[in-house]
Amino acid sequence: MVLIGPPGAGKGTQASILAAHYHIPHISTGDMLRQEVKLSTTIGRQIKDCLAAGNLVSDSMILGLVEMRLQQMDCRQGFILDGFPRSQVQAEATHALLERLAKPLTAVVQLIMPDEEIVTRLSFRRVCSECTRTYHLLYNAPKTEDCCDVDGAPLIQRADDTENSIRNRLTVYHRQTEPVVEYYRRTPLLKEISAEGEVNSITQAILSALAKVAA
Ligand code: AP5
Ligand code: MG
């Protein structure tokens, strides 16, 4: 399945819960790219500024990374794509790729959230520098200040969680990713879910939409 929605809608939060529920991998293209930057690989050095500014990296680069990832053994029973596809080119290439791999999509879950809420969600986000677990200083604070509950590693703010970058990511979302939502609206795959409210109630709404697909 695909989880699609604006920055800060809770794609990563929901994807990790759903991945544990269904025992399938959570594939976040944002996490994959940030790992390249962290390790300062050739790709990482090329995309560092693009990520910090909140622009999309090239379709060819992301498609290459996703194609390799989907061929790994842990994707045999399914996978959750978080933040991919997010351009029309990526959506069309994904369709062709999944046909070739005989892994058709079951659903595309759109998390819907108004722009005003997004800056608050992202300005207070902190992420673990080791395991990428996500916290929120107001809604989901760590037990010990600035430390991950799971591995005790320091929490950091993402380079693209500045006000300028957040606003640019929203513009990019409206311009380049909303056409992907429209692309999936023309198929039976799209499930629209409000991303406002408690994390658990949003998870329940997604699970019940997916249960109807499976039925
Ligand atoms: P990516 O990492 O995908 O970032 P994004 O789309 O901007 O989304 P975020 O990760 O910021 O938000 P989220 O929806 O995951 O929310 P979260 O669960 O963390 O992409 C980053 C960059 O990588 C892109 O800008 C681009 O440069 C590049 N990139 C990635 N994919 C690409 C692609 N396919 N093509 C080209 N370039 C690509 O939640 C946010 C906060 O809210 C957290 O603090 C969380 O704790 C809190 N929260 C979550 N749910 C709730 C709730 N219900 N109530 C209260 N708080 C909540
Ligand atoms: Mg995310």
Image (cartoon, helix red, strand yellow):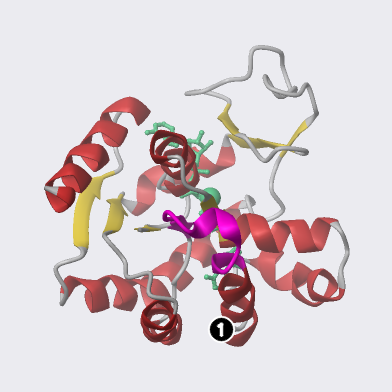
Q: Is residue 152 magenta?
A: no
Horizontally, is 157 left or right of 59 in the view? right
Residue toward you, 73 or 192? 73
Q: Is residue 74 magenta?
A: yes
The residue under the point 37% across, 70% down is 174
Magenta segment boundaries in residue numbering: 69-82
* Residue 128 image point, x, y percent: 71, 35
* Residue 47 image point, x, y percent: 74, 73
* Residue 66 image point, x, y percent: 57, 71
- Would residue 57 be seen by someone viewing this image from the given angle? no
| Whether the residue under disc 1 has CB within 8 Å of ligand 1 | yes
Badge 1 amino acid: Asp
Residue 210 higher or lower than 149, as above or below = below
How many neighbours does mark 1 have within 10 angstroms: few (below 14), some (14-19), or many (20 or more)?
some
Horizontally, is 91 left or right of 8 in the view? left
Quarter residue 201 falls in: top left
Q: Quadrant of the N terminus?
A: bottom left
Residue 133 higher or lower than 63, as above or below = above
SS for callout 1: helix
Quarter residue 33 falls in: bottom right
The residue under the point 29% across, 56% down is 110
* Residue 16 image point, x, y percent: 49, 40
- Would residue 161 be seen by someone viewing this image from the given angle? yes
